[in-house]
Image (cartoon, helix red, strand yellow):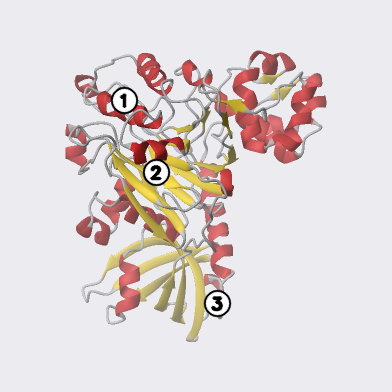
Amino acid sequence: MTLCMGKGFLLDKEMLDFLSGLTEEGVEDVIDVLGNLKLGERVITKRLFIENFEKIRNFLIELHGETEIKTFFEGLGYTKEDTQEKVSEEGAPLRPGKVKLISSPAFPQKKIEVRDFVDHFRSRYEYMRDVLSSADVENLSSIRKIGSERGSYTIIAMVVEKRITKNKNLFIKVEDLSGNIMVLINQNKKEVFEKAKDLLLDDIVSFNVTGTKEMLFANDIIFPEVILAEKKYSSFDECAVFSSDFHVGSAKFLEKNLLKFIRWLNGVEGDNLQRELAKKVRYLFLVGDNVDGISVFPGQEKELKILDLNKQYEKLVELLRLIRKDIKIIICPGQHDAVWIGEPQPIIGEDWAPGLYSMENVTLVPNPAWVEIDGNFKVLMYHGASMHGIIEEIPELRLKYGHDSPTMVVKEMLKRRHLAPMHGLCDYIPCKKDPLLIFPIPDIIATGDQHRSEVAVHNNILLIASSCWQEKTAFEEKVGNNPEPCKVPILNLKTREIKILDFSDDVKGGGE
């Protein structure tokens, strides 16, 4: 009962009895789902579950698995088996794909206060401190314990200020939970200086230093890099497809090309090899900006073909219904979707897109979201609102790559174990546990936003950036995006082979 009240809900006696059969984690999952679904009621009753049964059932099973949650559903009258064999329209048996939501940052159902920001940054620091201190470090010390006599130390601290001196050295003010101190990085220590140049405000790193409480001199800087022990391979010869940024409703929406892609998915477009590849597709990840939205930026109405947000989603549903039903479609929101822009973003609501809730092969997830599919692949879906800011703040990225290499931006996120490491890179909702930490470690990170398709591997983690289905807009030109629309990465989960198919007008079928 206390947990429910803390989330802003009340329980009637009947539901209290049902929920008492779950673990505390299971109860928290149920409450988070109710909050994300925006059912408009704060008193949890059996009637509430029965009336909204279909839209709650799949989400809860994917979030928590069937083993524990099944008894709870049976108590509510749930008897449907989710493991029945399905059959394609041609009568051939299809192995149903598995989609499980393994981590879903909850959108806080409360008024945000200063304390929430304190807890947010403290939780991030404590997590990073644990990661960095687990390495073999020498003379680990808090800032407060550094004395007046010169010594060697390792400190784990957050960057709060950064400036270049007239001698071209770097002064960095850092702090931990015990205090703050100045760290000097000499430009003659080239390797350390190169690392320091890329430091962002709010980065939490390990400094190997010498000096006193008056001034420390950096000998090395260690980032809390994400490293995956080994690559995963599925035992099933099947594929996952990654796309994003449909921008349905835009006057520049490339509907004809998207229909070409859908025909390929359905096995009626492309040459024989491409059609055989399409038969293996079991998963389609759509990583945000599914519609163009309304009033996302000033003057947007001049660039819209569909001026009603509900009708934009109706058109999206119309297109997704054309895709064969054995493909699992996993959809997260982006900045243009009908959700609160602050991250973590909740799932797209039924009030805006009721048609998505009636599609059995569609799974709606928040942004960001960690999803597990067959082969135990953990896929981190993140649309990428912070990517523009990271590019602008890191000189190496801005000058060498600009907006043309989205996977280079994701590498910087992995380096810092965070999707938006600097305050102000994107709008966010402060939570008691920072929801933008990269944890658990994913096998795949799928992003959108930059409208360019690119694939890379970093520390055994597969980075997949999705293309778009929209011609270049005036807004993109203003912010520096250079879109390459209609390109779709396809990953074979068994071999890890990746192909990028091109569904542009001048390419026959789905050309590579």
Determine which residue is flagged by label 3: 137
Q: 100 or 279, which lies in front?
A: 279
Q: Is residue 404 left or right of residue 407?
A: left
Amino acid beneath label 2? Ile
Q: Which residue is located at x 54 percent, y 55 percent?
A: 232
Q: Are marks 2 and 3 in contact (CB under 8 Å)?
A: no
Distance (Cα) linking label 2 and label 1: 17 Å
**Which of the two marks, 2 or 3, is nearer to us in this view?**
2
Q: Which residue is located at x 65 percent, y 25 percent?
A: 57
Determine which residue is flagged by label 1: 259
Q: Are marks 3 and 1 in contact (CB under 8 Å)?
A: no
Quarter of the image where one finds residue 115:
top right
Q: Which residue is located at x 78 percent, y 24 percent?
A: 74
**Label 2: how many Cα within 10 Å (few below 14, some 14–19, many 20+):** many
Q: Quadrant of the N terminus?
A: top right
Q: Quadrant of the C terminus?
A: top left
Amino acid beneath label 1? Leu
**Residue 311: which numbered mark, if any?**
none
Give percent across and percent down for residue 464.
Answer: 38, 48
Could you tell me if residue 51 is visible in this image? yes
Q: Earlier in the sequence, mark 2 or mark 3?
A: 3
Distance (Cα) linking label 2 and label 3: 41 Å
Give percent across and percent down for residue 99.
Answer: 57, 37
**Label 1: how many Cα within 10 Å (few below 14, some 14–19, many 20+):** some
Determine which residue is flagged by label 2: 490
Amino acid beneath label 3? Val
Q: 234 or 76, which lies in front?
A: 234
Q: Earlier in the sequence, mark 2 or mark 1?
A: 1
Residue 13 higher or lower than 163, as above or below: above
